[in-house]
Amino acid sequence: MAHRPGFARLATALFALAACGGKPTKVAPPGPGTGAGTGSGSAVVEDTKPPVEPPAPPRANRAPETFAPGWKTVGVGQTISFSVAAIDQDLDDVKVEVMSMPASATFDPITQTVTWTPTKADLPKANFTLAVTELTGPGAGQPPQSVSWDIAVAKKKQPVPTAPWAGDAAETLFTIREPKRVEATAKAYPFDELLAWSAETMRAPLPPEAAAKLPPLDKALLFKQFLKNLAVTHGNPRLDPDAPTFDKATFGDPKDWRLVVVRPRIDKKFHELRLVYQAVKAPEPVFAMFRVRPVEDLPTLPPEAKAENNKVFDELFWKHLLTADGAVNPKWKKDPKAHGAAVAAFVKGVLSYQGTAPWARSAFIALPTEARLGGGTTRNPDGTYASGDGWAWSVQKPMVAADGATQSYVNIGIPGFWTMTVPSADQAAWIPKCAPTFDPDDKGHKPGYEALCRKALGFVDLPDLSGKKPAPGKLDAVTLYRDHKLGPAVALLPLDDGRRDHGEENGMTCSQCHIRDFGVRDYGDPATADPKAGAPKAGNHPIATLNFQIVPSHRWEAYTLEFMADQECKAKAFLAAELGKESKLTCVLADASAPRIARPLPE
């Protein structure tokens, strides 16, 4: 892992910058400044002069990283696919080319995917050689980095590489991903029916006369809308049902979008359930994730709605997935079918909840999509690959049109992320605040950019600058918003500042969260959670770079493993606070003597 710049030098300079001029200013101690392209994180408590977002300091270049395929041996006639995408922590443009591969392999540069069916001529092994070139940043102009992989070829088909068991809590509570454990839930909630259910829950809050204007729900139409939006996200007509190049065999049947992970999220302030579906016939990773919860998603919810949502979720989680005394159920590891039935019962409880208040009914929140289908790829004028990794993120929602006569899935603005943090009014927690550039009440704000500030929540949307005025971005990719992600997004709150971990999606954008090279916050440093302890003096600890993991495939990434531990810590705390009883979950991250995860499992 590349060397990180020292904290002391950056902190001293930026603390002085934040505090100079005007009347005396009371500020929290400077936060960490370890991420390349970021400044220090001085959090304002009382300020008569708004903080200035300092320019990013000069940075040393970090080379792009590639990741070897999970396949070490493949059989003759066995078709496999793997990625050649590179990750660059500095967000530099990177071009990856396959310089050599066997004649039996094909390569899609738009999605950075190799598909290979070895023949007898490939025995006993085949070589794949890449050229990785940095096109921007300090590494631009340097010779390409050569990367070479050998994969053995056997006469018979080989087992698919699969990530090993990562611990009972992770596998039975927070990332339930083995086929037998999700089978019952998948059968109960087919992809197209869940699309229709989601649209139906969006109609529930409408007045009866408004709901009556809408046509009956059409599962086939909703599925088509979903695919067309995904095609727009990735600029890939393979996904567009109306395009002559539509890949109907891969994407056209909703039965081939299968549930692969059930993810209860008690680590969020508004607890929710995530159901992750995958286009299982695609050679590339293609995911759509339904976010649902027991209570409706409305801006007008009263404070008691959050309390009811979380209590209902906690009770269902405890009843179906824990033992009566709140422990990880030892039976679940040995009996996947019984565990799967419990998971299905838990999911049903969340998706069918009906309380007494009008807003107390299960509802759909959003449908994030995550795929390596070309959305993060820069194209040449003729449409061919120029650079990028092919990954992109978007969010869909079945919105009712302004005339109230139609409802359709559309891509919406991606919810924002932390750019600054301050103590809460009671000094008990760190909360987000829009950085001055985006804060409409800050006299230093940039005109037009206040449209990106979700002031009630304190965070900032990704900036789509393609129109006359800034607007919330509907697409995220590593190659997009570089100036924002290396500038105002981190100038007052570095990317690896542990205080971000209290925000939605760890307070960072989708792409940043999926390529991070640092772990979760340091539980041993009270400043990462308690403003009265000052501000963190160091960033989150270095960790092996996260390789876009959504679902563990051939290995568990180091960060994903640590994130499971973080979820258990937070679930333990929320269950105690919201149910008034102690579970037997553990919090290994609070144990200074426990070993820290730094590498993927297995090596």
Image (cartoon, helix red, strand yellow):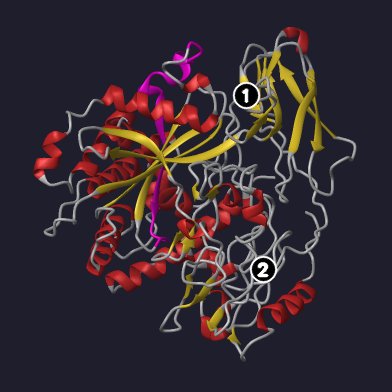
Label 1 environment density (alpha carbons within 10 Å; few <14, some 14–19, many ≥20): some
Which amino acid type is marked by label 1? Ser
Callouts 2 and 1 close, C-beta under 8 Å:
no
Look at mark 2 in the image and give the residue it sits on: 539
The part of the image, by quadrant, that contains residue 385 is top right
**29 lies above or below 132:** below
For image coordinates 62% across by 91% down, the residue present is 24
Q: Is residue 211 magenta?
A: no
Q: Quadrant of residue 101?
A: top right
Residue occupying the point 13% across, 59% down = 357
CA separation, marks 2 and 1?
A: 36 Å
Q: Position of residue 152 (x, y in %)?
A: 75, 23
Asked whether 518 or 482 is in front, the reply is 482
**Badge 1 is on which residue?**
81
Quarter of the image where the C terminus is located:
top right
Q: Amino acid at mark 2?
A: Gly
- Report the magenta residues as a range: 244-268
- SS at badge 2: loop
SS under mark 1: strand
Residue that lies at the very extreme toward the left in this rendered image: 209
Foreground tag (2 vs 1)? 2
Q: Is residue 437 above or below residue 77?
A: below
In percent of the image, x 81 and y 36: which residue is there? 133
Residue 526 x/y as whole percent? 56, 79
